[in-house]
Image (cartoon, rainbow, N blue to C red):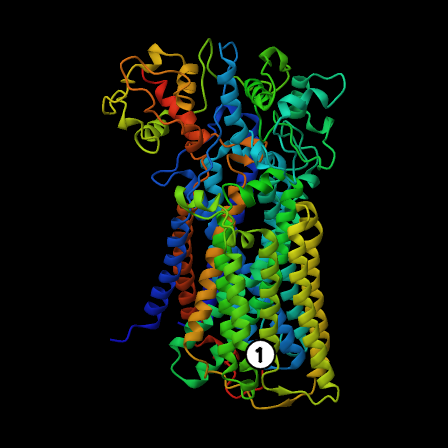
Amino acid sequence: MRLPVGVKAAIFTLIVMGLYTYFANSIPQIESRPPQELSLEGGNVTPAQLVKAGEEIFKTKGTCEVCHRIGQKGTRAPDLAGIGGRAGTRKPGTSGKAYLIESLVNPNAYVVEGYPPIMPAVDRPPIGLNRSEVWALTAYLQSLGGTVDVTLADIPATVGAGGAAGGPTAAEVKLPGDPKAGKAVFTGKGGCMACHKAGDVPGTPVGPDLSQIARIQTPDYIMRKILDPKGMGTVSGYPAGVMPQTFGQTLTAKEYTDLVAFLLTLK
Amino acid sequence: MNAGRVARRRAGWGLALVAVAVLVTAVLVGVAPAQTQAPAQEPAYRQFPVLGSRLAVWAVAQLHLNFAAFILGCPIFAVIIEIVGWRLRDERYDWLAHEFVKLTFAAFSTTALLGALLLFLFVGYYPRFWSYMTGIFYPTYWVYALLFFAETFIVYLWYYGWDWLAGPRKWIHVSLGVLSNLVGTAILFVANAWVTFMVSPGGVDEAGRVTSLWAAINNFTWMPINIHRLIANIVFGGTIAAAYAAFRFLSARTDEERARYDWMGYVGNFVALSAFIVLPFAGYWLGFEIYQFNQTMGITMMGGFMSWLWIVQAILIGVLFLGSNYYLWLGMERIPGSERYRKFMPPMLLVLTVGFLIWATPRSMVVTFEEARAMGGTHHPFLGVFGVMSAKNTVVNLMILTTFLSWVLYRRANRVSTKPWVRTGMAVQWVVFALAAAAVVAIGVLGYYVESGVRVLRLSPLQVLVVLIAIVVVMAIDIPMFRGARSTGAIRWGTIAPRSQYVLILLAVTFTWLMGLMGFARSGIRQHWHVYGLLRDTSPDAVTPALGYAANVITVVTIVFFALVAFIFWLGGLAERGRAEAAGHAAPAIAGGREG
């Protein structure tokens, strides 16, 4: 049977578009989600938590990583390895943290020689970090070769005005992690369920039951334990040296934050 | 029923539809300032049933854009063809110009209706956004409405006055065609001001209040988008018209009909290809301006979550390059004397294929964790070298040069120059090609050793300049060299292989799909902003979807577009049946005619 030209043309058209669609669905699928607000105002947050939150902001909402590398010279922006240590020497009479804060909210005030003045103020749209986020980001930058001593009071009140509105209050610490995604890390890539039970997630009793871990341990402990299980010691009654030391390398910052967020729901 | 009465009735319906669309615009424009005065009473968003608001706006906007591109692009080359026919006193061109305008004409009211539908969606489902845009661009709405009226009446006069303004009054008719294109371009520029403001806002203070309407219009990406869309519209119009001709060719029952539509397809493709060659340059300028506006946006576009989009784009453009060249090579088989140029096809195919592969090479490979560890990262030690802009810009320029060479060979396929300096002329042309290719490669290699700023601001434009100079020099020699050339035989229109017509359809489908993809890119780089940095998208749809989802939407919209186009052309054909002959537009014989 001879197909009409219109049918043949339609089939040909559908095949062509089908191939394009198939290819577009076969490559990495990356969504761009609106960044979450982080509020630490009035919160009792440890430097380690602050640094971790700052690292997440560095890689996501802050979009810093788009131009800055750590330990690798870039053509658009300076290498930030050791910035925490050398920040205090950049401008005479300016402390390290003051220099870092100025670099974030008024980046053109001092531009490193050899680089174009292209950095946007991080507390202005479209990045629009709030005061808490600038604080965490400064802490993270300080942690790169320096001592973390920045406090919320060091961040000018004018920074990210209104950025904390609607955010959490009191002593609640909110990390920019997604508990649902963290649960997937727990049961999937992290392989945690091979040794731990966690609420409704079944697991073998090789390691402690984590069903109430957020009630009996601090967020700081949980975060450090994942990254350095040996250094944090082994729970009595369980074999030592079983938990991998490599989560710091195998998990991405997002996966790590998501995993922590999930564990913090286990109360 | 008399065919003329049918056509007049259609025209009446068309006018009525356009008038309704413009009237609705005017009414809504009047209502909008009142909305801005009482924003608290308005919800920021409403939810479109089932599909969701974003998908509804996306689909209708893309459909509107496709139709608008066609009705703006097609008349540009229709009037050029009409002028050619007028000056050469060649009826074939006049008939062809009329055919193209007929296609445009049929799509006119659908474009206006889709525009009105898009407006309804914005007003109804994104009232806060629309109020904000209206607060800034309110005066331009009137300009847009008036231009639309002008365009409507001029195009109607152009189309219906084809016979009335023939003969000594032809210059008036041609002027109407030129005028309709100027007005159409002005409409495009006005609408582009709104769209580009959303991407790269200007003329407003930090709170989003307008400080200068002209600065809001003349924002960073306005003129690059104007130029890019203008050229792309010509390509689009050309590919759609060529696909229409291909369909008519494949359905033809007589040799004469086949010859006519073979020629029409060739002209449509020729116009599309001519504009397509310069399109990457306009795209580069647009990308450059995005970087100038906001580095973060530029880097997010090229190296962030959208980076894979450019691989898909490379594949689509690679298909367009390969398809266009293949069509030319198939077309040469119906030209006596073209045999002497067959030997150039394999090396040209090689350059195009290698260029295609390099352009489509991603910087970061899709690999497993173990593979990445073995490679020392996601950048392949060898292929990774081809995944950067230096390599891609180089091959794009080489592909443009190759396509230009294809066309030059096609142009001279049945001609033998009689000029005494022909050997020298041809030698100089080959030297120019070789020098241009060598310079493009050398500049590309140099690009690996300089900072990105130097590469972007100096080397890439230099590559473009080299190619453009080569094109100008080769043509400056070619035109006088083949003036008064001896013919080796007339083109045997209608004898081209039928598979060539599927290539024309492939080009139209691919370019339409590419337009959808670029629409997603332009909109997606705003991420979670309606107006970048000023008006945040706080709706449930604020997530910018992944490429797979976007591809699904683009495909569905493209299918709907082609279905509508087929239906409209069929309707147009019904109304026109028998009328052309009655009105003196009998299709001229093409087979064995003069070389085109």
Q: Residue at x 58, y 69 (%)?
A: B271
Tell me if residue A66 comes above or below residue B463 in the rendering: above
Q: Amino acid at mark 1?
A: Tyr
Tell me if residue A148 comes above or below residue B8 in the rendering: above
Task: Using the rendered image of the protein, determine whether residue B2 is visible from the camera's viewpoint.
Answer: no
> On the picture, is B63 further left or further right than B338?
left
Q: Residue at x 27, y 14 (%)?
A: A237
Residue B157 on image: x %, y %: 59, 65
**Which residue is at the front of the view, B263 or A30?**
A30
Task: Using the rendered image of the protein, determine whether residue B476 is visible from the camera's viewpoint.
Answer: yes
Q: Chain of mark 1?
A: B
Residue A214 on image: x %, y %: 35, 14
Residue B194 on image: x %, y %: 59, 43
Farthest front residue in view: A240
Tell me if residue A5 comes above or below residue B315 in the rendering: below
Tell me if residue B221 comes above or below residue A69 in the rendering: below
